[in-house]
Amino acid sequence: MTSHSPNNGLVVQARRVASPPPTDPQTRAEALSVAARALRSAEHVCVLTGAGTSAESGIPTFRDALTGLWSKFTPQELATPQAFEEHPKRVWQWYAARRAMVRAAQPNPGHLSLAALAHRVSHLTLVTQNVDDLHQRAGNRDVVSLHGSLMRARCSAGCPGVIEPDDQQADVPPRCVECGAFMRPDVVWFGEPLPMDLYEAARNAAVACDVFISVGTSNVVEPAASLPWVAAAHGATVIVVNPTMEGQRRGPSVLAVEGPSGVMLPRLIAEAYAGKRPRRADAGGGTAAARTASAVVAPQAPEPVVEHDRLDPSDPPPVT
Ligand SMILES: [Zn+2]
């Protein structure tokens, strides 16, 4: 049995493992409490993190990092295939500086909470727009890194394989051992599509999950911005954890937990699993078949376009 009620372009389906809240919570504490109940009964949880999560570890967003020597450049002069073609050394040095900054940073309590969450649910899909590998350093495995990793480089001419550049390779991009072309940062630049397999994995998780948690992202830059609404359209409870709810979409199954992720995620997880023992780390996949059977595709669901050639000055760019 399903019941459809169009609202802000979303179609909400009833009968999930974690039911949407019966009433619209009025306060943050209320939202947190409803979110915790949904999380407690969820089998499959999908989390999407964005630049806010990294910012809480002291990693400035791409634009905020354009200071000092770098202040004379625009993101397009540092993070496009054309920029690398014309000024490979400049682009490489920018990313070397970003890498050094990330190496000096540490995962924050938000990252650590998500690592702990992996032991609480039977299936966690962690999708990130961040390129700093802080989730992996916090202990999460199988992270879907939609925008790649600052810590890797790959052949700019397309040879397979990646390397992990060290600090000795900060000045000039190393050469590909196969073809001699420059190695480039293994991140998604403006105007480049997301890796299709990773985006599909993220979208499939959004469709199948019981609870979707959006953390530290303004949910503006497509196509990742559509993922919470894909989840909502397929009946999941969506929890938005962000310092501000400005610009976030609203809907009957969307719970706004306003505040820094390093504060709110530990609270959410503590409340959700109070008195409950952690599952084994390698617990199985839950009732995927049952969920798939109950999933319906909502005709009004926003269809993501796998390209992000749009630059919104108010929003962090796809790379951090
Ligand atoms: Zn090559």
Image (spheres, grey):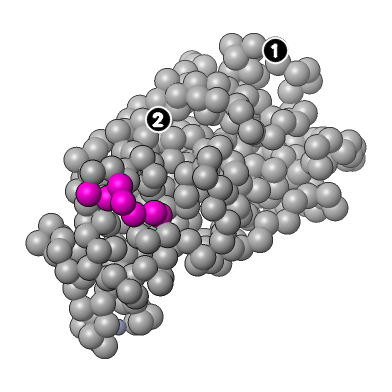
- Mark closer to the chain start, 1 or 2: 1
Residue 26 — which label?
A: 1
Ligand 1's quadrant: bottom left
Above or below for 217 versus 288: above
Tell me the kind of residue under disc 2: Gly
Q: Nearer the viewer, residue 55 or 64?
A: 64
The residue that disc 2 covers is 110
Q: Is mark 1 within 8 Å of ligand 1?
A: no
- SS at mark 1 in the image: loop
Residue 89 — which label?
A: none
Is residue 73 one of those drawn in magenta? Answer: yes
Task: Find residue 223 and report its image quarter.
Answer: bottom right
Mark 1 surroundings within 10 Å by alpha-carbon count, few (fewer than 14), some (14 through 19), many (20 or more) = few
Identify the residue at image location x=45%, y=24%.
260
Q: Position of residue 37 (x, y in %)?
A: 63, 21
Left or right, 23 with reference to 38: right
Q: Which residues are magenta?
A: 69-75
Above or below for 244 versus 11: above
Identify the residue at image location x=85%, y=53%.
299
Q: Nearer the viewer, residue 195 or 315?
A: 315
Q: Position of residue 225 (x, y in %)?
A: 61, 46
- SS at mark 2 in the image: helix
Mark 1 vs mark 2: in front: 1
Residue 51: tell me if it is visible: yes
Identify the residue at image location x=22%, y=49%.
69
Is residue 286 one of those drawn in magenta? Answer: no
Residue 273: tell me if it is visible: no
- Quarter of the image containing the N terminus? top right
Residue at the front extreme, as displayed: 72
